[in-house]
Image (cartoon, grey):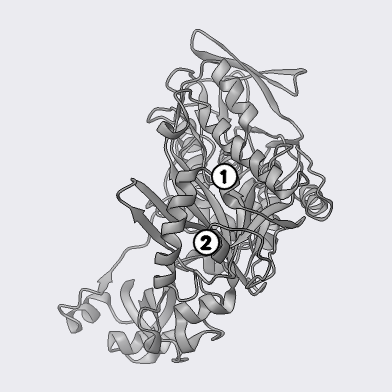
Amino acid sequence: MLKISNFRVPLTDDTPLEQLAARRLKLAADTICQVAIVRKAVDARRKNTITFVYTLEVETTVPAGQVLARLSGDRDVIQVTPMVSEDITPGEKQLTNRPIVVGAGPAGLFTAFMLAKHGYKPLLIERGRSVDQRARDIADFWHTGKLDAKSNVQFGEGGAGTFSDGKLTTRVNDPRMALVIDLMIAAGAPPEIKYLHKPHIGTDKLRQVVKNIRTRIIEMGGQVEFEARLTAIENKDGRLTGITINDNRFLPCEALFLAIGHSARDTYQLLYQANVAMEAKAFAIGVRIEHPQELIDRAQYGSAAGHPKLGAADYALVYQDRAAGRTAYSFCMCPGGLVVAAASEAGGVVTNGMSLFNRDSKIANSALAVTVNPADFGPNVLDGIEFQRRYERLAFAVGGHNYQAPVQTVGDFLAGKSGSSKYLVKPSYRPGVTPGDLRECLPEFVTATLAKALPEFGRKIRGFDHPSAVLTGVETRTSAPVRIIRGQDFTSVNTAGLYPIGEGAGYAGGIMSAALDGMNAAISFIKEYTV
């Protein structure tokens, strides 16, 4: 097997990859047995010569040594050996009760899948509802403004990521990530997620993937319960002994995987009361910004904007205010998407971004977030939650006390006024928007940093700071405000048998890293305990 790296193909070149690979290796086309794409990215730094950059694995009838000898000195062509699957051998410790997984987001689902696959018959409990019922509940909230605190964008099967862009980008470099991707593909995700530089599924396809993973967990002996909320944890002499569900059902338990997500505020409170070791951590808050997708496409791709091979363009922006010690950055950018209502508590407005697989809404949106540190919100480990809650409630008030979100044009925001309703795109947030002053529902240091960042972003992406671009508030759930402290074996440092995992535990930042974290925790457990 040969691997070709940094293999550039012009946007306009439609030659089959097999022929291009043969040409690159100086081989006849009929010697190529198979070409597999390992990675595919777009290089649009030069708008007049946009290229795709591939990493390919190629099987040929010509021995690899002969090919490499012919290409002597070419560092972009090497010989590789196929990966060998990891042998996971169960440990010897005995369990009296089956393991329990709390939360059916990516961390919880992948934990339960691995445990079920290896015969541990886990119980997976989820405070929200199944993904189909959840979708109906969310649609009703967006249409009527009636929030269901049990079933919303934050709570329910699939976790918060299911009602987002379904982005699978991650910076985590772990060989087990291939297992995560393979499972997603087996559950119905598009095969190209295996190699795209910035893969995404879209909320429409991700819902089916989630259901298929749940089905496999059950088929392998696991059990899944919805509307089952963790309400108490019992421990004795520093070791977990059991949990209570819905205040009325006790389950003895020696191994509990906590995949609670970043918005389970009541669960953080009960962990705090149970003296589980936790610490406050940094996060970020800000707004959502919307532009016509065409504006972003033109800025990123120039005259090639709209080319069918390119799709909707994205962006990543960072501004450092060194004098103030603050950073503003784009977060969870959703090409061809929508801004959505993501509240999970009564009396608060929370925004998020979402898009479907086709990314065809013609609107680009992204969070513009500013870093928040523990020094900004107080000494108590749970003070970050109250900090988030304060600004969500202010946004609820500015929006009209009915879950409509406050909006402001960039021009008004920078000029320190409000009330303009001439928008570059119609605000997509439902159940609706109310013109207002975002400075009334965000900390001064956040709005001051955003006011400095927007013109800088406009210099990087022409039109980004257009006076009629739409800002919608507030985005507060960028990551968990708390970290549940654990050791190298994934267990709590002061509560044996408790496995804090995923984004809610403070150890992940998206679908892929959360799924990987859950899988790694399950493997650590399997290597210690017998079936």
Using residue 146 as the reference point, say whether residue 302 is left or right of it. Answer: left
**Residues packed near mark 1 inside 10 Å, few (<14), some (14 to 19) or many (20 plus):** many
SS under mark 1: loop
Tell me if residue 159 comes above or below residue 188 in the rendering.
above
Q: Quadrant of residue 477?
A: top right
Q: Nearer the viewer, residue 41 or 59?
A: 41
Q: Quadrant of residue 100?
A: top right
Using residue 396 as the reference point, say whether residue 201 is left or right of it. Answer: left
Q: Which label was assigned to residue 305?
A: none
| Residue 86 placement (x, y as % from top left) | 42, 47
Using residue 85 as the reference point, say whether residue 144 is left or right of it. Answer: right
**Residues packed near mark 2 inside 10 Å, few (<14), some (14 to 19) or many (20 plus):** few
Tell me which amino acid carries mark 2.
Ala
Q: Is residue 397 visible?
A: yes
Q: Is residue 209 visible?
A: no
Pointer 1 or 2: first along the chain: 2
Q: Which label was assigned to residue 415?
A: 2
The quarter of the picture where the N terminus appears is bottom left
Tell me if residue 132 comes above or below residue 124 in the rendering.
below
Residue contact at pointers 1 and 2, CB within 8 angstroms: no
Tell me if residue 280 comes above or below residue 292 in the rendering.
above
Q: Quickly name the residue at label 1.
A: 476
Q: Nearer the viewer, residue 465 or 212?
A: 465
| Residue 7 placement (x, y as % from top left) | 33, 79
Q: Residue at x 57, y 31 (%)?
A: 386
Q: Residue at x 71, y 29 (%)?
A: 229
Q: Nearer the viewer, residue 416 or 260?
A: 416
Could you tell me how far apart the alpha carbons at marks 1 and 2 are, in whole angstroms?
24 Å
